[in-house]
């Protein structure tokens, strides 16, 4: 297929694309809102579409519906140019020739598999508006085989449109940077060579800045592109659980997991990134992606290939229980009625996302077991209060720590790492801290008179 709108627009020597595209982005959550704003920043005209009217209203006002560093600035800059608009009306996609699918694929209730309801609905919502030469670009994380199935639906609705799979690797907290300067681009292409060639040209025009910066591009088939995403997340999850398994050993043997991580990380084949031992991984991606991957492997008859991910998941979940046990140990055998301050509710710093947050899991376990828990977080209290109405949240570290017998650092926000242990000692009832992220300066806290403990250290 070589229609005019799928012909690759030539790239100018610098700056904006010579031929800006009109792009629709369906799904304006953590992925889609950042993607829409970033595509506008690249010079394209972008229409963000979402069924959630509240989210769309907020984006129209230039207010991100969630916290993501740099997003508010991008929204403001690009709304001013008129290049970036938001709507709940799916028919607005008619104006676009490239259609990104950025909706979530959460874990199914009571099952490991991914729930594809939102992807299916997003594609179904787009089909009536597809024109000859349009490109539908899947970015959501989906079980292998999904793109092939969706391509058939696209072909049935508009045989001259093409579907490609172009997974997203952005990290929350660094989403803008990861979208504008990705480590790599992956294009999962249809079998038809002419359609694939044309689609590659359009994707290169969409990502003209990254292409100019010589970002590696892996052009492959649907199945490989779908698998790249879940394989990458599985590898990252495995790396974290590996170091957390070492933390269990370090605790048993009286060794120090942070030094161990430094020492093995100097080996270039291993690398130090994602070897931070502690409370383990959470969020809307790694936990559900490894589970969905196992479920899909089972359907494909190769469940044994991914049995190790069950162990990765188990090691990760054990860290949360270990944290509660360590707190109990620190408090002399019981947490019932004890005042505990929890620093952090988001699943990671620089995000207000609380999906599968290890910090809130620990807070909830302790609260259920009778402790008096006060949780604070710089950005996530709104989301956390909505989801966990039975937990008590306060705005500041001082409020959380006032009269506490134990402080737990569970999300390593920069402001928590900058706390003054001498000053905080005046607020608490007992100067005891457990560093759930191995992120504090142990020496400084001990020097200030605190009992400092951490997961995986002496
Ligand atoms: C992840 C992938 O990194 C990203 O490429 C993919 O697109 C989506 O999933 P994200 O979930 O935003 O991104 O955050 P990430 O930085 O990967 O952290 C995931 C979890 O692992 C967090 O809970 C973090 O605290 C934890 N983590 C990370 C560790 O416990 N130790 C580490 O060394 C690194």
Image (cartoon, helix red, strand yellow):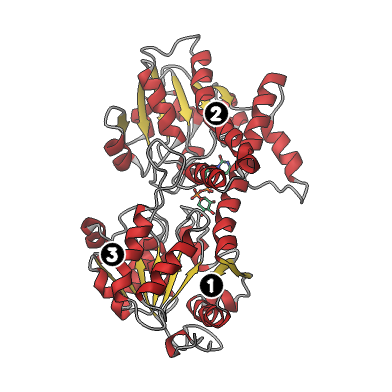
Q: Quadrant of the C terminus?
A: top right
Q: Secondary structure at mark 3?
A: loop
Tell me if label 1 and label 3 are in contact, CB under 8 Å: no
Q: Position of residue 263 (x, y in %)?
A: 76, 39
Q: CA distance from mark 2 to mark 1?
A: 42 Å
| Category of crowding for the residue at label 3, using alpha-carbon neighbours closer than 10 angstroms: few (below 14), some (14–19), many (at least 20) | some
Tell me if label 2 and label 1 are in contact, CB under 8 Å: no
Q: Please tell me whether residue 44 is drawn above or below residue 86 in the rendered image.
A: below
- The answer to whether the residue bearing label 1 lies less than 8 angstroms from the nearest atom of ligand 1 is no
In the rendered image, which residue does mark 1 sit on?
Answer: 190
Mark sitting earlier along the chain (2/3): 3
In the rendered image, which residue does mark 2 sit on?
Answer: 319
Q: Position of residue 322 (x, y in %)?
A: 54, 23
- Write down the quadrant of residue 377 in the picture: top left
Taking the image as shown, residue 199 lies to the left or right of residue 51, namely right
Q: CA distance from mark 2 to mark 3?
A: 39 Å
Q: CA distance from mark 1 to mark 3?
A: 37 Å
Q: Please tell me whether residue 366 is drawn above or below residue 416 in the rendered image.
A: above
- The answer to whether the residue bearing label 2 lies less than 8 angstroms from the nearest atom of ligand 1 is no
Residue 120 disc label: none
Q: Position of residue 433 (x, y in %)?
A: 51, 24
- The answer to whether the residue bearing label 3 lies less than 8 angstroms from the nearest atom of ligand 1 is no
Q: Nearer the viewer, mark 2 or mark 1?
A: 1
In the rendered image, which residue does mark 3 sit on?
Answer: 62
Q: Position of residue 366 (x, y in %)?
A: 40, 21
Q: Nearer the viewer, mark 2 or mark 3?
A: 2
Residue 275 visible, this orientation: no
């Amino acid at each position: 297929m070589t229609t005019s709108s799928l012909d690759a627009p030539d790239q100018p020597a610098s700056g904006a694309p010579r031929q800006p595209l009109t792009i629709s982005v369906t799904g304006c959550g953590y992925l889609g809102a950042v993607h829409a704003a970033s595509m506008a920043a690249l010079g394209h005209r972008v229409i963000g579409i979402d069924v959630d009217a509240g989210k769309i209203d907020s984006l129209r006002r230039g207010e991100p519906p969630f916290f993501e560093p740099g997003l508010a600035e991008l929204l403001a800059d690009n709304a001013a140019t008129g290049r970036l608009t938001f709507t709940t009306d799916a028919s607005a996609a008619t104006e676009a020739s490239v259609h990104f699918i950025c909706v979530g694929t959460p874990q199914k209730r009571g099952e490991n598999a991914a729930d594809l309801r939102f992807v299916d609905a997003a594609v179904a919502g787009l089909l009536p508006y597809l024109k000859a030469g349009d490109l539908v670009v899947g970015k959501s994380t989906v079980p292998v085989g999904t793109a092939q199935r969706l391509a058939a639906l696209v072909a049935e609705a508009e045989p001259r449109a093409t579907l490609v799979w172009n997974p997203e690797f952005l990290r929350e907290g660094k989403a803008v940077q990861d979208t504008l300067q990705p480590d790599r681009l992956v294009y999962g292409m249809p079998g038809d060579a002419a359609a694939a060639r044309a689609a590659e040209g359009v994707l290169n025009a969409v990502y003209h800045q990254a292409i100019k910066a010589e970002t590696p591009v892996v052009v492959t088939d649907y199945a490989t592109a779908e698998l790249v995403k879940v394989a990458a997340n599985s590898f990252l999850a495995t790396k974290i659980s590996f170091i957390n398994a070492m933390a269990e050993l370090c605790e048993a043997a009286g060794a120090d997991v942070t030094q161990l991580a430094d020492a093995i990380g100097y080996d270039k084949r291993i690398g130090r990134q994602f070897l931070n031992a502690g409370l383990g991984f959470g969020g809307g991606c790694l936990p559900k992606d490894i589970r969905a991957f196992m479920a899909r492997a089972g359907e494909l008859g190769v469940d044994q290939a991914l049995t190790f991910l069950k162990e990765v998941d188990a090691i990760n979940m054990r860290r949360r229980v270990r944290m509660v046990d360590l707190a109990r140990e620190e408090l002399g055998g019981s947490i019932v009625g004890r005042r505990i301050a929890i620093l952090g509710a988001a699943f990671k710093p620089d995000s207000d996302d609380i999906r599968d947050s290890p910090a809130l899991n620990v807070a909830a376990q302790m609260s259920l077991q009778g402790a008096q828990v006060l949780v604070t977080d710089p950005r996530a209290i709104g989301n956390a209060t909505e989801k966990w109405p039975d937990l008590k949240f306060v705005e500041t570290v001082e409020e959380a720590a006032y009269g506490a017998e134990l402080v737990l650092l569970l999300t390593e926000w920069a402001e928590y790492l900058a706390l003054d242990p001498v000053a905080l000692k005046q607020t608490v009832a007992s100067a005891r801290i457990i560093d759930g992220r191995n992120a504090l300066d142990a020496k400084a806290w001990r020097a200030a008179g605190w009992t400092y403990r951490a997961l995986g250290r002496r």
